[in-house]
Image (cartoon, rainbow, N blue to C red):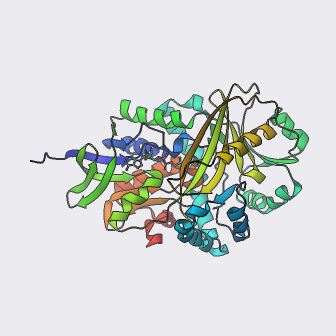
């Protein structure tokens, strides 16, 4: 005898930053939300990011000219982006799609999408932060991009001009001015750009956890720790099969990060979602005072004041979900941290590697699944999910209310991969 499935109004699969902001917005609409995750909140990709809140990011990764870097990705294991040879055959279709996105016309469309998500990020976050009581975790202190070479700064000029045209506040600093912003920085940096409108989160895992807990404690949401096995849409709702039994949901939001791909595939959608494996080293008791998140542009590596220390994070390694972390990546991060903050103590370290859910055009998949509109997609945020989550949560709640995604957000539809 089979028991009747548990009845849910709306199920959010995934308690990462995307599931958390989606749940917040749904709760605000008066929806009865059930959040399901196989782990505790914030222990997926959202655990280990660099904490950068960067609304001024205005470009996708696939930009014209990117193909010039591919040989380096394949042969130089120290390059900020690498492809593990063993994973190359599996990753090739994704890489070809990525190159296809790097034309001027396609990258312009993607850039529009990136800007839509990013530009109001901190305003969209304000009510979420207040609801979660997370004011102590989010710091509106700006962000610095650092350049150790003249060539590196030269390469930034086009982006600098575009951001000025877009009205993004940024200030070019001399090496001397930079030292006034962050006195502990090494003197290897010859140029810098300061973004007053950016900020950072000093504990990304706890940030997610507080949003989810507030949804439960103030918004009546339920948190269920189970593994979602598959989804079966029907005329009365979506059957959600989990490790704990079956549930029948009025609507389902898929916010399962890199694992979202395997939830939509049985429903007929093959989304090119590839992991860009990211690494961090978290160092406690550094003995240096640091106020802001900084990004060393040539290394594509960020250093952020997190918890009681510094987190140095970065690298995009295309290596699949199953290979062990590459040891040399941690050594590189440690070397970078010592170059950026030469006086920092670095004995007390923790290591982490996680999977950024990346689409070829750097845009997430947002909105109802065509033909199965009770299922709403919210995944594929790649390198910018912490910043883009506040927009995404809003978009999900609107899509859930109308069963359509706004015309102005067309570029995020899953149909682009049909
Ligand atoms: C090193 C690094 C640095 C980064 N730096 C930044 C930055 O500075 N700024 C920025 O904006 N972004 C940054 N990012 C990107 C950002 O962290 C991600 O885009 C974001 O965390 C993705 O969130 P998510 O909720 O989609 O995925 P996740 O956090 O992975 O959450 C998905 C959740 O779904 C659960 N799940 C999956 N499948 C199932 C299933 N079948 N059943 C039940 N539960 C399931 C998982 O357990 C997980 O908790 C960085 C990422 C990395 C790796």
Viewer-closest of 413 and 260 = 260
Instruction: Specify the quadrant of the image occupied by residue 152.
Output: bottom right
Which residue occupies 73% across, 32% down? Answer: 291
Instruction: Tell me: residue 232, above or below residue 16.
Output: below
User: How many numbered circles are shown?
Assistant: 0
Can residue 115 be seen by looking at this rendering?
yes
Q: Residue furthest right?
A: 176
Residue 232, given in percent of the width and then of the height, sits at 26, 59
Can residue 196 be seen by looking at this rendering?
no
Instruction: Specify the quadrant of the image occupied by residue 372.
Output: bottom left
Residue 2, given in percent of the width and then of the height, sits at 12, 48
The answer to whether 35 appears left or right of 275 in the picture is: left
The answer to whether 236 appears left or right of 80 in the picture is: left
Instruction: Tell me: residue 124, above or below residue 91.
Output: above
Instruction: Tell me: residue 417, above or below residue 323.
Output: below
Residue 327, given in percent of the width and then of the height, sits at 64, 45
Which residue occupies 23% across, 48% down? Answer: 246
């Amino acid at each position: 005898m089979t028991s009747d499935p548990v009845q849910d109004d709306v199920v959010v699969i995934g308690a990462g930053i995307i599931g958390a902001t989606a749940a917040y917005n749904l709760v605000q609409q008066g929806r009865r939300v059930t959040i399901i995750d196989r782990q505790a909140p914030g222990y997926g990709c959202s655990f280990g990011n660099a904490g950068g809140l960067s609304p001024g990011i205005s470009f996708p990764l696939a930009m014209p000219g990117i193909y010039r870097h591919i040989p380096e990705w394949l042969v130089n294991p120290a390059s900020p982006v690498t492809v593990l040879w063993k994973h190359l055959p599996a990753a090739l279709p994704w890489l070809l799609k990525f190159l296809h996105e790097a034309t001027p016309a396609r990258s312009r469309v993607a850039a529009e999408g990136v800007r839509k998500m990013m530009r109001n990020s901190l305003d969209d976050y304000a009510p979420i932060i207040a609801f979660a009581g997370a004011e102590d975790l989010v710091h509106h202190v700006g962000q610095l991009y650092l350049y150790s070479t003249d060539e590196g700064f030269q390469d930034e000029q086009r982006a600098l001009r575009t951001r000025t045209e877009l009205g993004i506040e940024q200030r070019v600093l001399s090496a001397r001015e930079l030292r006034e912003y962050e006195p502990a920085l090494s003197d290897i940096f010859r140029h810098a750009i300061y973004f007053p409108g950016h900020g950072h989160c000093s504990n990304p895992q706890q940030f997610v956890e507080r949003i989810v807990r507030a949804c439960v404690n103030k918004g009546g949401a339920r948190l269920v720790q189970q593994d979602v096995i598959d989804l079966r849409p029907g005329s009365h709702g979506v059957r959600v099969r989990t490790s704990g039994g079956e549930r029948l949901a009025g609507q389902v939001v898929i916010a399962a990060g890199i694992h979202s791909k395997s939830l939509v595939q049985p429903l007929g959608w093959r989304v090119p979602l590839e992991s860009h494996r990211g690494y961090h080293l978290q160092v406690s008791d550094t003995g240096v005072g640091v106020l802001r998140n900084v990004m060393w542009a040539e290394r594509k590596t960020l250093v952020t004041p997190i918890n009681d220390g510094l987190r140095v994070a970065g690298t995009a390694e295309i290596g699949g979900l199953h290979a062990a972390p590459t040891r040399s990546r941690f050594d590189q991060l440690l070397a970078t941290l010592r170059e950026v903050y030469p006086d920092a103590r670095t004995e007390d370290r923790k290591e982490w590697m996680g999977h950024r859910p990346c689409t070829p055009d750097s845009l997430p998949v947002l909105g109802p699944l065509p033909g199965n509109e009770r299922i709403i997609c919210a995944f594929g945020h790649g390198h910018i999910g912490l910043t883009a989550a506040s927009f995404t949560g809003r978009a999900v709640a609107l899509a859930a209310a109308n069963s359509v995604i706004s015309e102005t957000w067309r570029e995020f539809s899953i149909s682009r991969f049909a």
